[in-house]
Each structure stands twice: as structure tokens, then as C-alpha cells.
Amino acid sequence: MKKVLKSTLILSLAFLAFAFINPDKATSLTDKGDVIKWYTWEEAIKLNETHPKKLFVDVYTDWCGWCKRMDQTTFTDPGVAKLMNKHFYPVKFNAEQQENVVFKNYTLKYIPNAGRKGVHELAYSLLDGKMGYPAFVYLDEKQDRITISPGYKEADAIIKELTFIGEEHYKNKSFNEFSKAYGK
């Protein structure tokens, strides 16, 4: 028993030492893609400048119960995390945030008298004014919208979407065509 405890302690200390020497590598060793790395809008746009990738934008509000449920269930699924991290810069965007956002050289602002508690112009624009939550917006590498996906989704449903968009099946078939062949 003492040998097991001693070995565990030595491995833990070695990992901590490695983490202090190279924290980026230590993080990647612990999560192994099983956790979604969420970015702010600004972080994702900046990363996309040097390493182009699609964006997955989770448009949510603080009061949305289904948004919270997705955070606790769907977005904690390892399969969802793996696909999300592989193909996208995942962005959490609060539709009611009040900070300005620059998008394609336009400064977008919070509109206090719109929606339930106000709405941000970016959320309004991304969702074509259909303000329901949760809602997901897929953007290509140039930040042009691929599609909007409204509503709560279980892991298997969002995995199908992430595969459809991430592997670029959307370029040559409809989602219905893809869905019929998916998983066969």
C-alpha cells in the first residue's frame, strides 16, 4: 500500500513540475480533448487570423435553463468535445452582453430596449433576429455563416451536426441527405 501511495505521489509531483516548466503541454496532457476549450469572440477571431478554422458560436443568455442544461450535459460529452476542438473555435456569446464587439470592421453594440433584457447586435445579426436560446451558429473560416441551429440538443444530435459541418459535408449534400447516410 505504501509503495502505491509513494508512486502516486512521485507521479503527481513530476506532473506538477512539468506543468510549471511547460503549462501548455501539461494542460493538453490532462484534458486530451475531452473538454471543450471555449473562447471569447475576440480570442477566436484572433486565432482564426493565423490558423483558420470554423467557428461554433453558442448564443445563450444567463437566464436560459436549456442553455445551462446543455453546458452540464451535451457540452461535457467527450465525443462532442473531441469534434468541437478538432474542427472549430467554440465561442460562448451572451446575447445580452453589453460590451461592444468588432466584427468585420463594424462595431456592434448592446441594444437595451430590444428583447427580454436587451440584445447585442452581434447575436441579433448572427440569428437573423430570431432570438431563441440556446441557438448555435456555424461560421466558416471567413466568418461567413454556414447555418443556424436553434434549440436544445442532446450529444448525439450535436455530434451529427458537428460532423456534417466540420467535415464539410454541407458543401455537397443537404443535412437530410447526410442524416440518412450518417452512422450506417
Image (cartoon, rainbow, N blue to C red):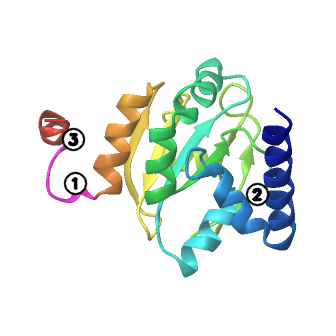
Q: Earlier in the sequence, mark 3 or mark 1?
A: 1
Residue 137 percent location from the top left of the image: 47, 46
Q: Residues within 10 Å of mark 3 (few under 14, many from 20)?
A: some
Q: Is residue 124 above or below residue 116?
A: below
**What residue is drawn where x is 82% and y is 60%?**
14
- Which image quadrant: the N terminus? top right
* First along the sequence among labels 2 and 1: 2
**Residue 58's image quarter?**
top right
Where does residue 48 sit, x and y in percent of width and height? 55, 72
Horizontal relation, residue 6 to residue 27: left or right: right
How far apart are the two marked residues, 2 and 3, measured between alpha carbons?
Answer: 34 Å
Dot 3 lies on which element? Answer: helix
Q: Which of the labelled discs sits on residue 153, or is there none? A: none
**Residue topped by disc 1:** 169
Pointers 2 and 3 in contact (C-beta within 8 Å):
no
Taking 76 as reference, is 66 above or below it? above
Looking at marks 2 and 3 on the same chain, the residue that comes earlier in the sequence is marked by 2
Q: Give the class, few, some or many, for how many residues have Cα within 10 Å of label 2's Cα (few <14, many ≥20).
A: some
93 or 84: which is nearer to us?
A: 84
**What's the magenta region?**
168-174
**Residue at (57%, 27%) from the top-left corner?**
70
Which of discs 2 and 3 lies nearer the camera? The answer is 3
Q: Nearer the viewer, mark 2 or mark 1?
A: 1
Does the stretch in magenta take in 60? no
Q: Position of residue 85 (x, y in %)?
A: 52, 55
Mark 3 — residue? 175
In magenta stretch: residue 169: yes
> Would you place residue 155 above or below residue 95 in this image?
above
The amino acid type, in three-letter code, at marker 1 is: His
Q: Amino acid at mark 3?
A: Phe
